Image (cartoon, helix red, strand yellow):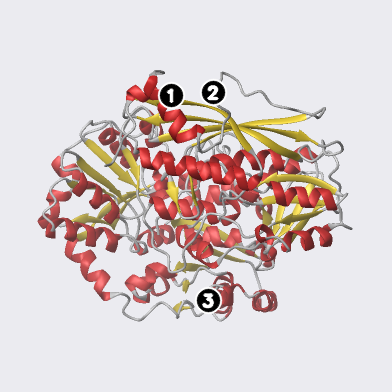
Amino acid sequence: MKFIDEYRNKNLILKLAAQIRKSVKRDYTFMEVCGGHTSAIHRFGIPSLLPECIRLISGPGCPVCVTGTGFIDKAIYYSAIPEVILTTFGDLMRVPGSATTLEKMKARGADIRIVLSSLESLAIAWDRPDKKVIFLSIGFETTAPGTAVTVKQAEKQRITNFFLLNAHKVMPPAMEAIMKDNVNIDGFICPGHVATITGPGAFSLIPEKYRTGCVITGFEPTDILMSILMLIRQVNQNSPAVEVQYSRAVTVNGNSAALKYVYEVFEPCDSVWRGLGTIPLSGLKLRSDFERYDAEKVMPVSLPEPEDNELCACGEVLRGVKTPSECPLFASVCIPGNPVGACMVSAEGACNTWYRYRMNNE
Amino acid sequence: MNELVTLSQGSGGKQTHELIRKVFAERFVMDMPLTDSAILDCTCNTMAFTTDSYVVDPLFFPGGNIGKLAVCGTINDLAVSGAQPLYLSASFIIEEGFALCDLEKIAGTMADEAQKAGVKIVTGDTKVVEKGKCDKLFITTSGTGIMIDGRQHISKGTEVKPGDRLIINGSLGNHAIAVLGARNRLSFSTPVVSDCASLNRLTEKILMNCSDIRFMRDLTRGGLAGVLNELADMTRSGIIVNESSIPVDDPVRGLCEMLGFDPLYLANEGKVLIVAGPGEATKVIGILRSDDLGRESEIIGEITDDKRKTVILSTSAGGKRILDTPSGVQLPRIC
């Protein structure tokens, strides 16, 4: 298949792996920030191609995983209101809240629908003027433009029964929070799709302030191996920088049309991340002009402090302090069929990925 | 006129008989008058018997409808057990207000499929429930067939040995993606059509001509990954599969890449995994490829003596990883 097979060419992959083996001079720890990368790395069996001195750790880039329990609790609260239709991306269904999950609420009769896009949710609002439709908007720079367009559409079509329970986040502040946490990282494998929106400049703070390299990376095996090679070279030459491996998609200025939408509808705000706490200016909230689409403004809710399982190590896993197998619950109590923490839920969560493809991690 | 099914057609009275006669009995060529049981001739010592319920949203999708699924699915469960399917029952739970013309279309498809497969629908039942008490239409079919001597091991996998080859009869995931596409009104530049088909003639050809067939199973819910893990568990052996030899059509692959699905976990309705002795694999492939339902057949891997009962995928990228048992439903990714 075009644009896929070329990047999964076995000969090229083996050549890159050989190059990596030739280039290594010490131990290296690289963090793949994005859950999509974690998933691709294990799906293609990349750890089995790398020398032992390279350690890959997962970062805070799975939108479902970093969404706090408090957000899930609010979603569960709204889902119980009879006049509400809750719409969500599928993965959130199974994330444990303090007391229950959306999946269990649905089984009890709550009207919760899985959608593939925020626009689908808007269409439901159009079809059901008798209901309040709340879309759980989570995700990073990649999903925020879609939500922004949807809010603009709602405004244009004068739809008044569509709302967001919003927890959109942006990536670079979380990477900075990890650096401040003194996690030992020699370089970041940065999310290529985020950079297609933001442009590579969004990551420049990391090498400038923390002397740690960033390579903006595509999602195919050759992309990932090439980025690892680029990061090794940066470390060997002590020349941290933002480099773009994913040059077939990333441009210097990013997607300015998408960014225009995002910042027309949203503005930066502090945001709570699972495991990382509140990170200044790491979230996006609706601007005052669009507050009428904010479920929390229109239907205020006040809930008790969320409760997480004390043994669950999702927080440490998301900070790169622990690998999933270092969590006491991993693969014993916490499995994909019975997830205790969010990282075991999403197909892009580190724990879920490690569990499914666990051979390479044993 | 858009005639709708009403509650009175499920009351057991005149209207019920009328519905059964006009929609079902005539199409299925049932013996008249209808009695409480079908009386069947049987000349064998051992029989296979199976049942399955069918729910699908939407009821009509590219390549089939719920009726086709209900006939093919039950025929395939018999066929992959090594049996020759003969008779089916079909029970319908219909939601009040269901369009009669759709019911006729579905019954028509069932009659056609049964005839093509050489199977008779001999008995059935109809219930109509109030609106909202079921989702449009549910069908349950049961099937029975003759078990030929010497084939009892096929469904149990007791003869499977290290070195045996794994064969599938074509590309994976088409049914799941066709239904998903129809449900979400996704448009494809190349249409994806469900692979829904009765496999009994194909499996019979294989079993008649090959002496060394060790196991067969249709790749429905849970997909190839689900069946391989069951097989590893049943036979207490390991399995190695080569990702690059598993056929997946481009539109299916494209959509899987986009949504974050793995085609190895997607449901099929016309695909079978055949485990054959190493000496017979080429012959099996030859027979399969000479049939329309097996043109894209491939040898995809083999049984190993790995006692950990794990299924290993040798990835097209040259790496290796575990291919795990599916858990829950595959959900589309966020970004």
User: Which residue is drawn at the image coordinates 70% and 44% (left, top)?
Assistant: B217
Residue depth check, mark 2 versus mark 3: number of the one nearer the observer = 2
* Residue A264 drawn above or below residue B25: below
The residue nearer to you, when weighing B51 against B198, is: B198
Residue A296 location, x and y as percent?
A: 19, 42
Q: Which amino acid does label 3 sit on?
A: Lys
Q: Do the residues labelled 2 and 3 touch (CB within 8 Å)?
A: no
**Marks 1/3: CA–CA distance:** 57 Å
Residue highlighted by disc 1: B17
Residue B279 falls in image quadrant:
bottom right
The answer to whether B50 appears left or right of B189 in the picture is: right
- For marks 1 and 2, the one nearer the N-term is 1
SS of the residue at dot 3?
A: loop
Chain of the residue under label 1: B
Q: In which quarter of the image is residue A76?
A: top left
In this view, the residue in front, B174 or B320, is B174
Residue placed under numbered mark 3 in the picture: A2
The span from disc 1 to disc 2 (Cα, nearest Å) is 9 Å
User: Which residue occupies 86% across, 57% down?
Assistant: B280
B43 and B282: which is toward the camera: B43
Q: Mark 2 points at which residue?
A: B34
Please report contact status of discs 1 and 2: CB closer than 8 Å, yes or no. Answer: yes
Give the amino acid type for the residue marked by disc 2 in the picture: Leu
Q: Distance between the residues labelled 2 and 3?
A: 58 Å
Callout 2 and callout 3 share a chain: no
Chain where mark 3 sits: A
Residue count near mark 3 (Cα–Cα under 10 Å), binned few <14, some 14–19, many ≥20 = few
Residues at discs 1 and 3 in contact (Cβ within 8 Å)? no
